[in-house]
Amino acid sequence: MFAGVASRDPSLYFFSSRVQELLFQLNDRQHDLVFKPRKLGQKLEAPQYVFMTDEDLDKERRRIEQRLREKLQVPPVLGPRKPIERVLAKDPRLEGLHDSKLVCIDISPDLSDRKRMITVREPDGTLRTANWNERGRINQIFLPVDGRTVTMPKMFEEPHLTECLDREEYVSVLDRACVQFEPDDPDYIRVTSATYDHVDAARLYERLQSTRHFGALAFYLAWHRRIDNLLLYFIQLEKLNQAVKLIHLYRLLRSAEPVSDQTPPTRQESSQSDGYSSSSDSGSESESSDSDSEGVQLDIIRDYIENASVKRPVLELALQNFQHLSAERRRVEREQRRADGRQ
Amino acid sequence: MLSLKLWVPKLAGASTCFRPGSSCLLSSLKVQQCHHAAGRLTPVLSVLVQKQDKAVLGIQPSRNAGFFTNMSANELWKGVTGVSNAGRKRGRGRGAGVKRRRDLNRGQVIGVGKVNMMWPGLNAPVLRNGELVRQQSQPRDEQRESRLQAIRDQFTDQRSFKLTPLERGWSGNRLPGRSIGPPDAVDFETFEGFDTTVLELKTVFSMTATAGRTRHISCFAVTGNGAGLVGYGLGKGNTGMAAIKQCKRRAGQRLIYVERCDGHTVFHDFFTRFAAVRIFVERRPRGHGLQCHRAIREICHRVGISDLYAKVEGPTDNVQSITKAFFLGLLRQRTHQQLADEKRLHLVELRPEADNYPRLVASPGGAPVRSKEQIPADEELDFQLHIFEGKVPLKMPPKQPFYMKLPCYQTHLNKVKHLKNQEQVRVSLLAEHGEVRSFLADQYPECRAASAALWAEKRQAAEDDQEQDEM
């Protein structure tokens, strides 16, 4: 749970643009998965066709990049909310007037649901603000959100939640949780944590790839210092870029000072906070030649494995395999080029 | 034992005939005389019953000969089932109520009849163990009549056969809509994967100088392999079989290749016409099915198109014209690549269910893509208008029932408003509580309807009580 670890507030780290960019980069962002046809019970129509010039095509591609960012916006990660009940007035003379609680809500449409006034008059005459549970229910009754239910769906309770996760329905559980709960709801945190733990245990990270939940999963694992399985996954798939980004995220979230947006990332700063001799920055790394950046990446990964990893032998073996394969591939390419040259 | 002597009066023109199995008791076979003249009453055979001492006891009349025995089975059946030429022209002698001839010999053995006797040389051996076998009467077979009747009943009824739903055509057991198999192999071409469907089978007449009105059978069929190859053919012949054979052969000889989009539908909507038939064809998404005239549906099955909408206007019964119109339309289709080439622009697909992601399906091949400046101002860039060459199919708004305009309809809607969400409420109550119950059920438990949830609770309560008592 986010509450437990050193009582740090993840929201102080989550909203920084550097962390957000890292979370975006960690995602595969495959267009055909992000924009896959969704079966929402709607009547299908034949597709539309449009003639386009090169300019029109570029414009569409830019629009799609924008849309991609929107679709892959990571659901916010906040710590659990604090109670907000407070007594406004005590009127003992009202006792016995009603046998049930009365609730008042300000239904002005221009108010935020979190800020609008909801008060409760108890049968004993106490007037107090509604607690979070009551707020959620009353808001849903008077200003319903599409897809949300007033009471919590049974699928988020045990044993149904575990059954859903055992059936590997991660994306639907997470999507419904995003609709049903607010991000600081302890139930939301419980459900998402259970899902991420299950994904991590089953190593089924590809289920969440190209969805907005992958960033949240990566943040969760990095926050709880359990990135080894995901790192292994990246190394085995030869995605060294993303392995390095994950390590960078881990370092950022471990730093004592919350990451701020004002200070731009510098090489010294990142090296100090990471404890590296070789520096690397997430998005601004230029890959002059494949083998150079690969060397740098391998150094970073090796550094992490030696200093901070829990599953050191497994990761080392995976890295060795990668290097071996990489060398083989380069040798074969060289020989191929020589053979082609001769021809 | 009585000995019998027959005395038959001799009549002019009479001839002798033999009829076995007569109802008279005979100690030996005697030839009887019968009368051949049609229409006249058969002569009565007088049987003299004599006692052993040759005294005549009396005369017993019996009729043992007649037109049943004079005429052959064919002649008799023709008389019963026959229809005159004039009647046949009117279609009599066909259909459900027609009498069918039955072979009465079925189930019968020569030598065995109503009288169950052993005739040596006929239904018994002449010699058995070196001894001569004598004629012997055997006990009557009571079941014989009913057995014969059962056999005859078997063969009378409908010769019509039942087809399974998958084999069935458009109507009854008739051939239109039914498959007649692939075209016959020719040289090396085995027509593997092909199937032919009959679209029309009719009797046609033509006046000739010599024979006058001549009758032929006409068969129109379409063949295809479900992967784009398809052809239609018309055959005529004196018999149905000849016509079918000819049309199947021709259909297999005249194959065309039809391009399909994504293997399941046409590339775009189109309009096509042949003779008086006009067809508006629309592309449909996967899973929609074939929403069209039954002839077009069969053609689509043969081509391999599984999703389409087509509206036929004009003579919808002229299957040949419809087929030709549809074939023309399929051939005139333009693939995505062809469209991109002729326009020299990229062709991009947008699917609403995929968030309108712009998928590039075709780019111009030879010439470069035109820029905005190179496109004239009056050029049609809209895809639908380009396809229909500037025309637009007229789409009438869907017809609403007459009552929706009346003010009383609003009254009705207001009355039933509270029921609109009833089904959903029931479902969510069942999901949450296991039964349909009101919020007052806790306070007033007696208002809960009999339901599985209620009875489960009662059972549980009873079990708990039992446990309590035991403890």
Image: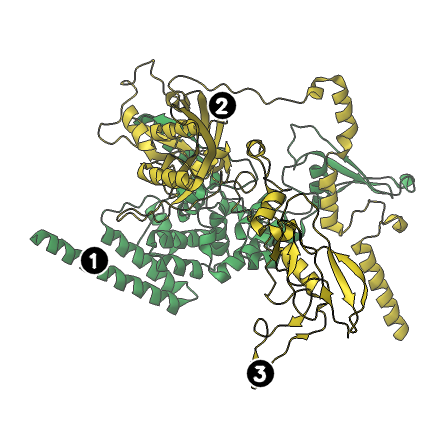
Image coordinates for residue A237, horizontal then vertical, percent: 35, 57
Q: Classify 10 Å Cα crowding around label 2: few (below 14), some (14-19), many (20 and above).
A: few
On the image, numbered disc 3 is attached to which residue?
A: B128
Label 3: which secondary element: strand
Q: For marks 3 and 2, give the CA distance.
A: 81 Å
Image coordinates for residue B93, horizontal then vertical, percent: 59, 39
Question: What residue type is disc 2 on?
Answer: Pro
Question: What residue type is disc 1 on?
Answer: Arg
View extreme (bottom): residue: B129
Chain letter, colour yellow in render: B
On the image, numbered disc 2 is attached to which residue?
A: B315
| Letter of the chain that mark 3 sits on in the rendering | B
Q: For marks 3 and 1, give the CA distance.
A: 104 Å
Would residue A157 appear left or right of A239 to someone viewing this image?
Answer: right
| Chain A color in figure | green
| Occupied quadrant, residue A130 | top right
Above or below: residue B62 compared with residue B221: below
Above or below: residue B90 compared with residue B388: below
